[in-house]
Image (cartoon, rainbow, N blue to C red):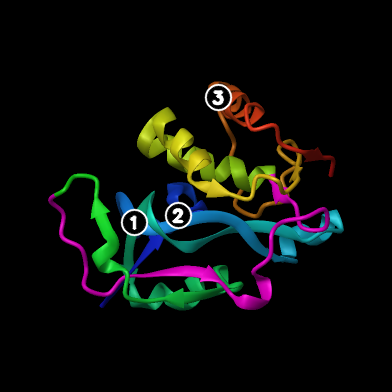
Amino acid sequence: MLISYFGYGSLVNRATLASDVVALPGRLEGWRREWRVVGRPAEADGAGRGACALTVRPEPGCAIRGVLLSEATAGLAALDKREARYDRIDGISHQFRPDDGTAGVPEAVFLYRAKAEHYRWGDEDHPILQSYLDCVLAGFHEIWGEAGVDHFLETTDGWHAPILADRHAPIYARAVTLEPDLTGLFDERLAALDLRWVDP
């Protein structure tokens, strides 16, 4: 038995997944990303702050790139633990469009959306972790190149939240190491957004 779910943030990055998870790139219609789930995950405790992560909201006319992930049902408990601040939302298979246009889509597909008690914009006490953002952008770049990075930035709301500059001392538990060319690309794109940065 398999479970299938849509990843739109860190789950897009292959390095954050188990080796047996199968990923199918595509688009999910009718949804938009936002920096709007806050909490105090264990990895942020050392910074004395909580953190802000990604969630999604229904948005007619919008479509977001991501991956349809499939794995054995036995992995669901670990996945739910990873996404503890989120509820499972079922019934989205008809909204997923594979990039190759030919792959079949499972009948039952879900995504994770922020629980009501965590659904707030990021703020000074719950900044976006740069190490988390780097992980997400690296995943999008690996699959779709620079177009994927641009798409992510354009289809995500909440950039008014401050970003904690923890790249060189990562707080995020699944932080990745970037090649210099990727570091430069991400910094260039983010500079155009006029973001607010805070020190760890």
Measured in 3D between alpha carbons, the distance from the residue under mark 1 to the one under mark 2, in whole angstroms, is 9 Å
The amino acid marked with disc number 1 is Leu
Of circles 1 and 2, which is in front?
A: 1
Q: Which residues are magenta?
A: 102-129
Q: Residues within 10 Å of mark 2 (few under 14, many from 20)?
A: many
Q: Position of residue 27 (x, y in %)?
A: 32, 51
Q: Specify the label residue 8 is tagged with.
A: 2
Q: Quadrant of the C terminus?
A: top right
- In this rendered view, identify the residue nearer to me: 29 or 173: 29
* Nearer to us: label 1 or label 3: 1
Residue type for callout 3: Leu
The answer to which of marks 3 and 2 sits earlier in the sequence is 2
Q: Secondary structure at mark 2?
A: loop
- Image coords of residue 151 (percent x, y): 44, 38
Which tag, 1 or 2, sits closer to the chain's start? Answer: 2
| Tag shown at residue 185 | 3
Identify the residue position indicated by label 1 in the image. Answer: 28
Residue located 68% across and 57% down the image:
52
Find residue 85 and report its horizontal and vertical position in percent. 61, 72
Residue 20 in view: no
User: Is residue 132 or residue 92 the one in the foreground?
Assistant: 92
In the image, residue 87 lies in the stretch drawn in magenta = no
Tell me if label 3 and label 2 are in contact, CB under 8 Å: no
Q: Quadrant of the N terminus?
A: bottom left
| In the rendered image, the vertical position of residue 172 relative to residue 108, given as above or below | above
Q: Label 2 sits on what residue type?
A: Tyr
Check whether the beta carbons of the residues at disc 1 and disc 2 lie within 8 A of each other: yes
